[in-house]
Image (cartoon, rainbow, N blue to C red):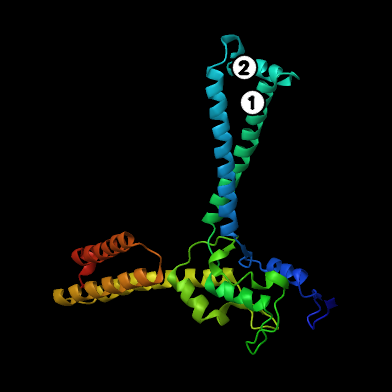
């Protein structure tokens, strides 16, 4: 039923069950709560059934082909001409061709069903599992956890009450881009900085857009500080030994930042560090690296 809060907006409340759970999933702007069961075991069994059905149909087709080799030449026209095959299969008294036509149609339908199931399964396999934090929030809503952290009752009854128990059999339809370590750290330890809406339960909504903007700004500032800070220090240092020490120190700091705060691979870390060190070495060896008297 609708409720009128102080800000004048109308809040719609739904009965606990499928209505409230569907509303919760749809209310997430980032669609990270679109979490559903994979049913991997049932899907694998269904593919095995389809596969076995095709194996049986293939065996029947091979048996018919072997029988056709022994038939007189005038009766082999159906093996070369589809229209002849179709006309003979339509004859009432031609049981042999009718069985072969039925088999061909069965194979066509079954192999289409089998390959469609394979494509769908391949698509589902590529979908990732929900993040642990998102799954925890979803479970809290599903089990109606109060602010004290106590489970009250599951939103869905019957067997569906246990549908979120196996995390390995869950998938998130929204495949988010791979997050860097800084984003994961901020999301896990500093979620309050990005909260946009709270609920009556411990659940709170955070803004993914605000989080990504913050991470982008932090990365730009950190990169600028490491580059211009190193140049500034090297510009006013005249001792070659100290310059080498600064270059080594800033390069190590750069490598740590790239390795810990981004998803860069090892080869990418080495390449970026080499480029960073090369910039500093060129600066020191050039005219800009000498302090003017």
Residue for point 66% across, 22% down: 96
User: Residue furthest toward the top?
Assistant: 74
Q: Are marks 1 and 2 in contact (CB under 8 Å)?
A: yes
Instruction: Please give the name of the residue rendered at 55% of the width and 34% of the height, measured from the top-left corner.
Output: 58
The residue lying furthest to the right in this view is 1
Q: Is residue 100 above or below residue 20?
A: above
Residue 63: give x, y in percent of width and height.
55, 28
Checking the image for residue 100, the label placed there is 1
Which residue bears the numbered disc 2?
78
Res 24 seen here = no
Question: Residue 149: where, in percent of width, then height?
Answer: 62, 87
Q: From the viewer's perspective, tell me whether residue 157 is left or right of residue 227.
A: right
Image quadrant holding the N terminus, namely bottom right
Structural distance between the alpha carbons of marks 1 and 2:
10 Å
How far from the left and from the top, in percent, is residue 272?
A: 31, 62
**Is residue 272 in sight in this rendering?**
yes
- Give the mark nearer the N terminus: 1 vs 2: 2
Figure label count: 2
């Amino acid at each position: 039923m609708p409720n009128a809060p102080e800000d004048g907006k109308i809040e719609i409340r739904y009965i606990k069950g499928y209505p409230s759970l569907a509303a919760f999933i749809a209310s997430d702007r980032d669609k990270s709560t679109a979490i559903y069961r994979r049913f991997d075991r049932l899907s694998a069994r269904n593919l095995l059934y389809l596969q076995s059905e095709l194996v049986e149909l293939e065996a029947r087709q091979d048996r018919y082909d072997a029988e056709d080799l022994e038939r007189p030449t005038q009766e082999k026209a159906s093996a070369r001409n589809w229209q002849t095959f179709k006309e003979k299969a339509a004859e009432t008294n031609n049981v042999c061709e009718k069985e072969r036509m039925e088999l061909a149609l069965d194979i066509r339908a079954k192999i289409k069903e089998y390959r469609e199931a394979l494509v769908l399964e391949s698509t589902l396999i590529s979908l990732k599992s929900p993040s642990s934090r998102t799954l925890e929030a979803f479970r809290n809503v599903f089990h109606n956890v109060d602010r004290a952290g106590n489970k009250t009752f599951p939103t869905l009854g019957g067997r569906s009450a246990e549908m979120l128990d196996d995390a390995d059999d869950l998938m998130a339809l929204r495949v988010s881009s791979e997050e860097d370590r800084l984003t994961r750290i901020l999301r896990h330890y500093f979620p309050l900085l990005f909260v946009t809406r709270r609920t009556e339960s411990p659940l709170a909504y955070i803004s993914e857009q605000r989080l990504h903007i913050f991470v982008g700004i932090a990365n730009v500032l950190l990169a600028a500080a490491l580059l211009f800070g190193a140049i500034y220090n090297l510009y006013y240092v005249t001792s070659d030994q100290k310059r080498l020490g600064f270059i080594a120190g800033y390069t190590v700091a750069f490598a740590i930042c790239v390795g810990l705060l981004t998803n860069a691979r090892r080869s990418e870390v080495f390449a970026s560090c080499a480029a960073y060190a090369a910039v500093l070495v060129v600066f020191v060896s050039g005219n800009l690296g000498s302090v003017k008297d």
